[in-house]
Image: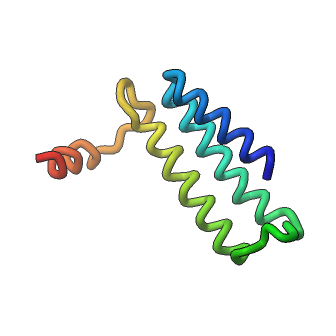
Amino acid sequence: MLSVLAATAVGLLLTAFGHVRIGCLTIGAALIAAAVLRRVLPSVGMLAVRSRFTDMVTYGVLGLAITLLALVVEPKPVLELPFLESTVRFLVR
């Protein structure tokens, strides 16, 4: 838990100091690592408030979403989604 928290803190600091893409990728990787660790570790003691499945799905979906958003952030997106531009134009109208 401390390693995931530390990686998230590093990602937040990177984002605060202007490295948005790298910071968000770090946070996304930390959440994906949390999902993997929740699956692999046998027990988490008193931290087990929710079910293992709920934790894995929540961490995994949030980690993938943050990582995807970090890859499509402007300027110079690493990943270009064809429907994203029309969706943004429709929503911002």
| Rendered view: 45 above or below 63 | below
In the rendered structure, the answer to whether residue 17 lies left or right of residue 45 reads: left
66 lies left or right of 81: right
Colouring rule applied to residues: rainbow
- Residue farthest to the left, as pictured: 93
- Percent across and percent down for residue 45 are 87, 70
Q: Residue at x 27, y 49 (%)?
A: 83
Quarter location, residue 8: top right
71 versus 34 height, above or below = above
Q: Position of residue 29 (x, y in %)?
A: 65, 44
Write down the quadrant of residue 40 in the picture.
bottom right
Q: Residue at left 51%, top 47%?
A: 66
Picture residue at 40% right of the left edge, 38% below the top: 72
Position in image of residue 44 (x %, y %): 85, 66
| Residue lying at the far front of the rendered structure | 46
Q: Is 6 left or right of 54, judged from the image as shown? A: right
Q: How many marks?
A: 0
Q: Which residue is drawn at 66% across and 52% down?
A: 32
- Farthest-out residue, bottom: 51
- Seen from the viewer's position, the closer of residues 77 and 35 is 35
Looking at this view, is 83 or 41 the one in front? 41
Q: Where is residue 19 in the image (x, y as percent from the top left)?
A: 52, 24
| Foreground residue among 87 and 50 | 50
